[in-house]
Amino acid sequence: MNALAARDARNVRLYKHDAVEVLGHEIAPGTLAEARIWFPDPWHKKRHNKRRIVQPAFVALLASRMAPGGLLHLATDWQPYAEHMLEVMEAAPDWRNALAPGQYADKPDWRIETHFERRGLKLGHGVWDLLYRQAPIK
């Protein structure tokens, strides 16, 4: 946020609210150039997996809010969640892997190292990045 303020960025909105509600009620269709979901709660217990934000319905809603070709950048330090994200995104008809089908990305230069990433690395976890573009409407 400090970097945004230093650049006097005016094309950014920050919300501390439920992402599904924000997307559904605050963001107009076709307006987002980029969305970043870095190190979301992995809900690692099997009975809680349904609470993960990266689910088919959510990525479909997000795709509807993206501008054509918009970028979705996902990152996690929890391997089972990385595999889940990849599975959901590869099955999503509105998204295309920016590298190649089924591929994870190297950490892009623009992604800062987060607290959760540092903690995961200290615990010996790997880190997985995924880059997807909103697919052209047919």
Image: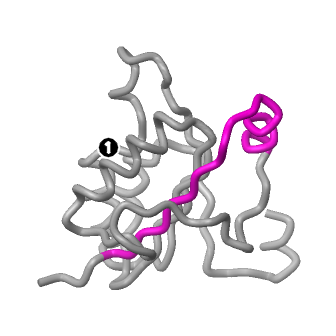
Give the magenta range: 115-134
- Residue 129: quarter of image: bottom right
Could you tell me which residue is drawn at 37 percent across and 81 percent down? 67
Does 61 sit above or below residue 6? above
Q: In which quarter of the image is residue 66?
A: bottom left
Q: In this view, does 59 lie to the left or right of 76?
A: left
Q: What element carries label 1?
A: loop
Q: For the C terminus, give its image quadrant.
A: bottom left
Estimate the x, y position of residue 42 in percent, counting from the top left. Answer: 52, 32
Mark 1 nearby-residue class (10 Å; few <14, some 14–19, many ≥20): some
Q: In this picture, is 31 found above or below 25?
A: below
Whether the magenta-drawn stretch holds residue 132 is answered as: yes
Q: Residue at the spot x=73%, y=35% of the render?
A: 120
Say which residue appears at 25% left-offset and 48% top-offset: 56
Q: Mark 1 points at which residue?
A: 55
Disc 1 marks a residue whose amino acid type is Gln
